[in-house]
Image: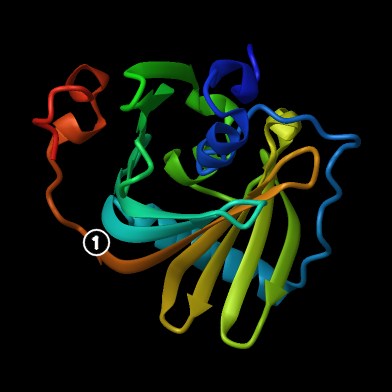
Amino acid sequence: MPTVKSLLPRCPALGASLILIFGATLAWAAAPVPASLTQQDTLELQRIAAYLNNIRTMTARFQQVANNGGVSTGHVWVARPGRMRFEYDPPTPITLLADAASVYYWDKQLNQTSKYELRQTPAWFFLRDPISFGPDVVVTRFERLGGMVRVTVVEAAQSDAGSLTLDFTENPLTLRQWTVIDQQGKRTVVSLSDLQFGMALDPKLFQYQYLFTGSNR
């Protein structure tokens, strides 16, 4: 499978940072090391899994900070399992779409689309159904930070697909941010605001054939 950089012919640095909102095909120098979890930590992970599984649809505003400090904003829609869409605000001419099997990267300015497997990205953890912290997922970090909970995961069978860190407010439990880190230590952070849950979403939002028509919003 080609790397993300090879899929993005225009402005590789920008393209790579944008696509990391979903994650990329990444390489690890060594197998991930599981975190040492207490019984309380395990119970908290079960609570987090139940919360995430309860999310069927979601919309939010997002702010993305790339490793080089570049900031972009936009709107995200989620329909679990498997579907997610990021629409970037101008001047960023990018739409990212996951349709349960593939991720599509559409550069509106060049009218070019790239495609790769959703299953090969860290985003798969959030989009799969059901979500669990079972033996197929390695929890490499678990932290409580002043009313926040932070969990870093790597899929056991896909350790070369990168790491995903999820940040939650603890009370009430709410997803606020995620971070993807690539094999070079480059970090892309996506923060969420104005979250809404449980609404009806047009299926066309997540269908590739409607990506270019303007009828999907």
Name the residue: 71% across, 29% down.
157
Name the residue: 68% across, 56% down.
152
Q: Residue 8 appears at what percent x and percent y? A: 54, 21
Q: Residue 108 appears at what percent x and percent y? A: 31, 27
Q: Is residue 108 left or right of residue 213?
A: right
Please, which residue is most extreme toward the top here?
1
Q: Which residue is mark 1?
A: 197
Q: Secondary structure at mark 1?
A: strand
Q: Is residue 215 left or right of residue 69?
A: left
Say if 143 sits above or below 29 in the image: below
| Residue 130 visible in image | no
| Residue 108 visible in image | yes
Say if 181 sits above or below 151 in the image: above
Q: Residue 185 appears at what percent x and percent y? A: 79, 47
Q: Is residue 192 left or right of residue 136?
A: left
In the picture, which quadrant includes the C terminus?
top left
Q: Amino acid under label 1?
A: Phe
* Residue 82 occupies quadrant: top left
* Residue 214 occupies quadrant: top left
- The crowd level at tag 1 (other Cα within 10 Å; few <14, some 14-19, many 20+) is some
Please, which residue is most extreme toward the left here?
215
Please, which residue is most extreme toward the right here?
30
Q: Residue 36 appears at what percent x and percent y? A: 83, 64
Please, which residue is most extreme toward the bottom here?
146
- The colour style of the image is rainbow
Residue nearest the viewer, comparing 124 with 38: 124
Q: Give the total of numbered labels.
A: 1
In the picture, which quadrant includes the N terminus?
top right
Name the residue: 72% across, 40% down.
182
Residue nearest the viewer, comparing 139 with 20: 20
